[in-house]
Image (cartoon, rainbow, N blue to C red):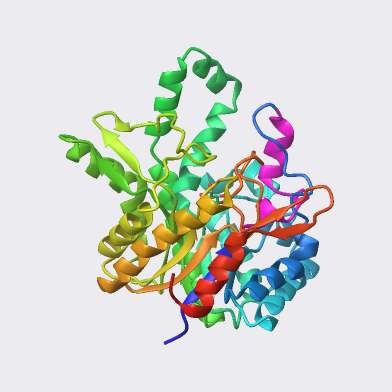
Amino acid sequence: MTEFLWGASTSPHQIEGNNLNSDWWEREQRFPEMFERSGDALDSYHRYREDIGLLADAGLNAYRFGIEWARIEPEEGQFSKAELAHYRRMIDATLERGMTPVVTLHHFTNPRWFADDGGWRDPRAIDRFCRYVEAAATILADVEWVVTVNEPNVYALMSLMDNTMSEEGRAAMADLSVDDLLRAQAAAIPDTELGDILADAHRAAKVILKSATSARVGWTVAGQAFEPTPGNEDEFARVKDAWEDRYLRVSKGDDFVGVQSYTSQKIDSRGVIPHAPHPDNTLTGWAYRPDALGIALRNAWNVTEGTPILITENGIATNDDARRIAYTSEALEHMFAAQVDGLDVRGYLHWSALDNFEWGHWAPTFGLIAVDRTTFERTPKPSLAWLGDIARSGRA
Ligand code: BGC
């Protein structure tokens, strides 16, 4: 039995800086009124050793980070040996500090050429992704945990966002009241067609990785911890299936499924109810629901029929670090309770290691480590030492 992973997670675009060849970079330049820019981000591209060192010094034994397709293949078919070597150095830096790397291959961003030339809906998409995975596999031979695609369900929702960035889409939105707009956003269901394409991409990537590496291979699913309001069980079942279960079923028989949980959502006859503004809401406007982790874990376990679970993200956007500790402490109690009930949970990776770029916004801070974005100075928060102590003792 390998040791329980206690760690923290990041993704490339959110921490590295100057991810110039990615579609997200382009989006930030085109719609500055909608998105703050990632810019230099946290310059973790150059400062990864320091970041890894802080996590290791605190006592964590795992670091989840991603490798960036847009850097590794900046133009179709042009693979950068230097960028692959860069990510190999990150893997080695993690191993050298006695930590287990958990490597994500796709975390919301695509190379610009891929996005501009049809993106995931183009018939060539899966072959293109597979060529990237083959290149990535050359540096992953001894990596024990690989995530193919991060949160395909959220990605399949985000792609709907592209419509809202077109002239027509925005004109249509202009006529909606704020309430209707929030409702429309909350009720949006991930695009199942795109979800199916990502599932095929995951399966194809898994075949490549299983033959080229000794990694455990899985994908991660955003658990929504849906709850029905009285009388709306049918709508609850429909939304839960479209949002979450159809993605979890893909993980049946996989080495692991990554569970990612932040909050819970209530369902009425019209679908997901938007979170009402409330003083307890987090900086992302989500309800404060540390118990969501337990709900998400149990749902993943039931739907996958017992696929081992790695908690690949759980955390809270807050400026109050004591609240981060309180939230996480309660979430961990729900994880321990699930383990007592027989769920096979292999690790807990907190989101996030650093206060990073929250997809167009800098204000929602999820990090165990604060970063001054002018000097790039890192300042660990008390929550990092607190989580490190749990990692050392194995108990909250
Ligand atoms: C994503 C992260 C994101 C986090 C908080 C997850 O959906 O994987 O990239 O920052 O949630 O919103």
Kindly give the residue lying farthest to the right in the view shown: 375
State the quadrant of the C terminus. bottom left
- Please tell me how many numbered marks the rendered image carries: 0
Q: Is residue 67 above or below residue 247?
A: below
* Horizontal and vertical percent position of residue 142: 60, 83
Q: Which residues are magenta?
A: 9-32
Question: In which image quadrant can residue 91 be found?
Answer: bottom right
Kindly give the residue lying farthest to the left in the view shown: 231
Q: Is residue 305 above or below residue 183?
A: below
**Residue at image point 42% right, 40% down:** 287
Question: In which image quadrant can residue 117 be found?
Answer: top right
Compared across the picture, whether 285 is left or right of 253 comes to right
Compared across the picture, whether 378 is left or right of 119 comes to right
The answer to whether residue 325 is magenta is: no
* Horizontal and vertical percent position of residue 307: 33, 70
Along the line of sight, the residue nearer the viewer: 104 or 283: 283
**Residue at image point 80% right, 69% down:** 82
Along the line of sight, the residue nearer the viewer: 84 or 361: 361
* Horizontal and vertical percent position of residue 47: 78, 64
The answer to whether residue 17 is magenta is: yes
* Horizontal and vertical percent position of residue 384: 60, 64
Q: Is residue 77 visible?
A: no
Compared across the picture, whether 382 is left or right of 259 comes to right
Kindly give the residue lying farthest to the top in the view shown: 175
**Residue at image point 30% right, 71% down:** 343
Along the line of sight, the residue nearer the viewer: 214 or 290: 290
Q: Is residue 65 visible?
A: yes
State the quadrant of the N terminus. bottom left
